[in-house]
Amino acid sequence: MIWLRVTVLFWGLSPLRVSGFAAVSMLLALVPAAQIGLVASAVQSVADAVAGDADAGRSALLSGGLLMAVSLASHLLGTCLQYLDSLLRLELTARVGEWVMRKGTMLDLQQYEDRGGLRQHAARLPGEQRRPCLSGVHPTP
């Protein structure tokens, strides 16, 4: 259930970045399968070349080249994934800081000194939309 709350929280930050992160993650998940298929093809081509097939050497070189291209794509996708992850983390930190400052500017000095008043204010302000609570513990009034 917490994953759903986290997903909603991140989706609210930037749907485009979250969609990009998901797409890059899925593409990156396909890389091992492509690498296994290309290695199997290269090994089979080398075995065929040893057996005397004339076109097998070209097939082995093609498989090796494609394997290098997939490895390069994997590296670039991993870099892109780390970049998107950093952007989402930075945006989340900034947004949470903004929420805290917005609530802090609405408090009076007396509410800062009174713990009960602070708890009551933290519960929910009138007209304010409810945001997901990541810890699962909601403040009590």
Image (spheres, rainbow, N blue to C red):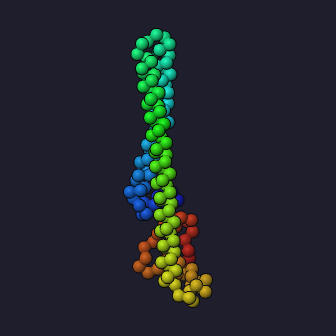
- Name the residue located 51 percent from the left edge and 66 percent from the top edge: 93
Which quadrant would the C terminus be assigned to in this image? bottom right
- In the displayed structure, 13 sits above or below 129; it is above
Q: Farthest residue in the bottom direction? A: 110
- Name the residue located 44 percent from the left edge and 26 percent from the top edge: 63
- 19 to the left or right of 122: left
- Name the residue located 43 percent from the left edge and 31 percent from the top edge: 66
- 14 to the left or right of 111: left
Quadrant of residue 58 within the rendered picture:
top left
Quadrant of residue 11 within the rendered picture:
bottom left
- In the displayed structure, 101 sits above or below 133; it is below
**Total number of numbered discs in the rendering:** 0
Along the viewing direction, whichever of 96 and 65 lies nearer the viewer: 65
Give coordinates of residue 128: x percent, y percent: 43, 76
Along the viewing direction, whichever of 114 and 62 lies nearer the viewer: 62
- Name the residue located 48 percent from the left edge and 78 percent from the top edge: 102
- In the displayed structure, 69 sits above or below 84; it is above
Residue 17 visible in the picture: yes
Give coordinates of residue 42: x percent, y percent: 48, 23
Q: Farthest residue in the left direction? A: 16
Give coordinates of residue 85: x percent, y percent: 49, 55
Residue 5 visible in the picture: no
